[in-house]
Image (spheres, grey):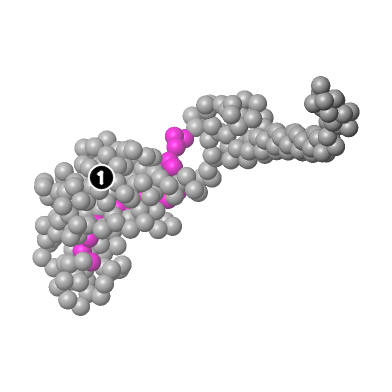
Amino acid sequence: MAEEQQQETECEECEEGAPAWMATFADLATLLMTFFVLLLSFSNMDVVKFRTMLGSVKDAFGTVTENPGDFEERSSTPISIQLSEKESSMIDMLEMGDKVKQAIEDHELENEAEVTIDENGVTLKITGKLMFDAGSASIKEDFKSFLDTITKIINENNYPVAIEGHTDNIPMTSSPLYPSNWELSSSRATAVLRYLVEKKGIPAKRLMAVGYADTRPLVPNDSPENRAKNRRVEFHFMKETPVTNPPEAG
């Protein structure tokens, strides 16, 4: 009985309600929850802004989006980049130069042919002894397979091609058909042109032939080796406006 009275006395001395520290803890928990809610809302806002920004960047680089500002939904067909005529022509010339180089490798003519690419187009230089016998303008039969490969490359585009004949500085004295290097160089260039037109069907309006004799040497004509280098035929794939059909009169 005495113990029950003692317990009742102790309970009467206890304060009613939760301890004071609980109120402080509850306030702190509420503040923390509010803080994280604000962080979450800011994060969602950043995502929206990020999507809008990324969508704008993709539009700037040529991708059409179904919904502007949404990078997750986009069209499967991108906008093609428009190149200038000059840029497009240069790309064509680089591709053509690579094809000519590959043709040289395929026919194992690295020591007899050379390709250069510059602002004027693609130039293929071939030593004269590979194409013609000395003092002759008749194309060698074993060279025609390589010429047929070059024909395929010419047919893949519609750029004009200039064919040039070059000789060394030794005068022609033993051929009644070619009294000078002018006739020989011109005849060799013309022989190649006629082969391309008559045998391979390339339109004549795309081709031109010219002989330069010994007026444009690659190296000085001071040794047999150098004179052999100067005896050559050159193909110039000219970087010009492609040849088009003239309008019909009407």
The residue closer to the viewer here, 78 or 68, is: 68
Q: Would you say residue 27 is visible in this rendering?
A: no
Above/below status of 184 relative to 250: below
Estimate the x, y position of residue 28 in percent, counting from the top left.
79, 39
Q: Residue at x 80, y 26 (%)?
A: 3
Residue holding disc 1: 150
The residue closer to the viewer here, 26 or 158, is: 26
Is residue 244 left or right of 220 when viewed as pictured? right
Q: Residue at x 20, y 51 (%)?
A: 105
The residue closer to the viewer here, 176 or 230, is: 230
Is residue 218 left or right of 47 when viewed as pictured? left
Q: What amino acid is found at the position of numbered circle 1 in the picture?
A: Ile
Above/below status of 209 relative to 172: above
* Quadrant into which the N terminus falls: top right
Callout 1 secondary element: helix
Instruction: State the extent of the magenta-drawn residues as a range.
Output: 230-246
Task: In the displayed orientation, state which residue is furthest to the top.
Answer: 1
Q: Is residue 101 magenta?
A: no
